[in-house]
Amino acid sequence: MKENFLSPEYTEFLEALKTRVSLSQYKAVRAVNRELILLYHYIGTEILSRQKEHKWGSKIIDKISQDLTSAFPDMKGFSSTNLKYMRLFAESFTYEEISQQSADQLPWFHLVTILVDEKDPVARKFYIQKARQHGWSRNVLSMQIETDLYKREGKAISNFKNRLASSQSDLAQQTLKNPYLFDFLSLGKKAHEREVEKALVSHIERFLLELGEGFAFLGRQYHLQVEDRDFYIDLLFYHIKLRCYVVIELKTGEFKPEYAGKLNFYLSAVDDLLRHPGDNPSIGMILCRSKIGVLAEYALRDMTKPIGLAEYRLTEALPDNLKSSLPTIEELEAELLKDVKKVTKELKNSPLKNSN
């Protein structure tokens, strides 16, 4: 009987094998990484202990680096700088904390980034957990530390506790930040809502990264028709983990209580027109350029829909006094043309040209 290698049975069999091989490779990489992290912690701990016991100075690090590199020429990681990182690692985390925080599941230089860029022990544990949970690259991790995600996450004003089931309200609250940093935009103080919307959508990858894990973008100025009237939502998302629609309204001026009422209406419409039977109640978020405080809390108190409020910040445009001191494009072009003419004249009168 001739074998049919294109049959569904063989395809299913092959996929099962590929899945098992990939899983085995992943486990092997994790096991190797864990051993490396524990080795580095051991080395750091021993350096600390021996320096204290024998009163060795900082130069002992260079000596250890030379001898370990000589003993293990095929192994990287024994530079003086890396040995100092190992010592810092041992100073910052006990062996038990490494397992408790799952620090051994992160690549070494993710841990180095956290140790060097963040000094708060509690914040360090926060970034370890988040980097492991979301699979951040080292660049993304560095950016999250630089923008103080630890101090911003879960800080938005909201009525979630009173409007959502407890199983969803905590996750929803942690999903929101305050403030949001749209520092990849350069729109200036006088930018209108539509300009901000358009710029955010054109930088959607950075925008989604700042919003956080789980947001799926559905549209800008999303159209809703209620009876014979048309309404347009600034930005509409679906959140994968919360399993609900998220309606975002952008405001460049001061917060006004009527903004919450309008968003409450939008959420009712979304729940009625878009929400599926398996979806959770839709969530609204108002992002303002101005400070929010007690006025916002009052506005949310008796709203029937779950709404959060937060600030957002943009990169400011150049101040007028600085703009006036900078050359215009025309001035730069004129200066460049003057230099070109000067160089051309010098070349015509050069001795080399005359000798030919």
Image (spheres, rainbow, N blue to C red):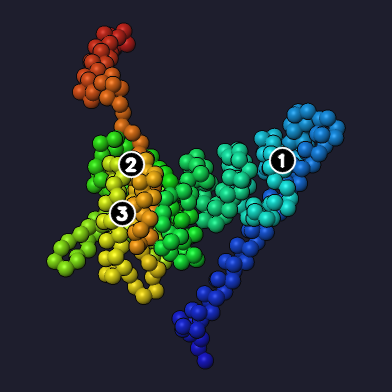
What residue did someone put label 3 on? 260
Q: Tell me which residue sits at (55%, 57%) in the image.
A: 133
Mark 1, secondary structure of its residue: helix
What residue did someone put label 2 on? 289
In the rendered image, residue 356, in percent from the top left (x then y), is placed at 29, 12
The relative height of residue 258 versus residue 343 in the rendered view (above or below) is: below
Foreground: disc 1 or disc 3:
3
Residue type (three-letter) at the residue carrying disc 3: Ala
Q: Residues within 10 Å of mark 1 (few under 14, many from 20)?
A: few
Q: Say if residue 342 shows up in the picture.
A: yes
Tag 2 near tag 3, CB within 8 Å: no
Alpha carbon separation for disc pair 2 and 3: 15 Å
Alpha carbon separation for disc pair 1 and 3: 49 Å
The relative height of residue 227 versus residue 237 in the rendered view (above or below) is: below
Foreground: disc 2 or disc 1:
2
Residue type (three-letter) at the residue carrying disc 2: Arg
Asked if residue 290 lies left or right of residue 6, the reply is left
Q: Residues within 10 Å of mark 2 (few under 14, many from 20)?
A: some
Asked if residue 317 lies left or right of residue 10, the reply is left
What residue did someone put label 1 on? 91
In primary-sequence order, the first of circles 2 and 1 is: 1
